[in-house]
Amino acid sequence: QVLVTSSKGDIRGEVVHVDTDYACVDYLDKCDHTIDVLFDYISYKAQETLEEDDVWSDGSKVYIARKNNTFDQLKRIPLNRIRTDPSWLQEKIAENRTDDLACFLNVDMFKSIVSDFIDQDWKPHCVSLINQTSDIVLAAVSDSLQKSGDFERFPALHQLIKKQSTHAARALLLGAEKQMQSHLEIEKFPYTQDNALFEKISSARHRGLKRELEVSLRLDNEGAVFDTAAMQSIIDGVFERNQKKSVEEHMAEDMEIVLESYGTVATKRVIDRTPMICWEVFRSVVPSIQETLWNITDKQLEETMQDSKEFAKRYKEVTAELEQMNKALT
């Protein structure tokens, strides 16, 4: 769900179509199903059968199907007039409110939301990247061993090298997974002593109010002209609507600003960290395998380089035949 800024205040809706510089939003409240903020035209009668809630475009206009074979033309709303609906935060605020300074943002709630976000949104992508790295590394090790030479005579030696190489690769991958998990656990305790975070919060704090003023004063329309009294009336109306919001609504908006700003800063760390961990695995896998193979003892080599009984018997027979041939020649 989103909020669309209009001259009458925020309109709640649901995004049904997104383009590069605009989006189309369908109404949630029946009273908003009018030709104003969300729609250019409504209740067209279709000639062909339509499936309700289907959305389509003819290249320049976007439509949505309704009941009784009718459809509406959705308004193309600039993206800067659409923002997420912070109402879901009001429930969390109510659940976590304490008796002390109830009008201030709850730090524990902020930590809880960040922790949930990490587990639900960041962690699956990080785990997926680690798994993909694991698949690539293990497949490369296996393929390399298959092409490294003929081990038909000493299959036990081949198994030893394969075991040691795979163990070295898996040890690196396990270490990478632990590093990723450790990093995400650290991120669950938000680090907010960041000047970039302070700047983002400051710039976003009055963004909604500024956007509503711009829309109400029609600053995007070069032909719009208001006299002083009209401008004062519009400005007073915007501030009155803002003052009528409950404490919970204001707190939810403030919390959303902090979360959005923190997410922008913290996401950069996560985006960089896990790929760096995976890249270190790729860089280290060959040296690690080499070191592991150098640690194979002479005793292990001797045990794995024993000929099979069948090979020893055949070797003895061929040697005897060769001696007989040499005697015959001499």
Image: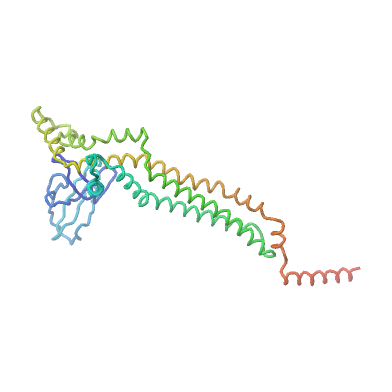
* Relative image position of residue 312 (x, y in whole percent): 75, 69
Q: Which image quadrant is residue 21 in?
A: top left
Q: Is residue 245 left or right of residue 89?
A: left
Residue name at image x 32 percent, y 39 percent:
261
For the C terminus, which image quadrant? bottom right
Q: Looking at the image, which residue sits at the far right?
A: 330
**Tag count:** 0
Q: Is residue 175 left or right of residue 106?
A: right
* Relative image position of residue 267 (x, y in whole percent): 38, 43
- Give the colouring mode of the picture: rainbow
Residue name at image x 56 percent, y 47 percent:
284
Q: Looking at the image, which residue sits at the far front?
A: 99
* Relative image position of residue 295 (x, y in whole percent): 66, 52
Q: Looking at this view, is 282 or 254 the one in front?
A: 254
Residue name at image x 38 percent, y 43 percent:
189
Q: Looking at this view, is 189 or 310 the one in front?
A: 189
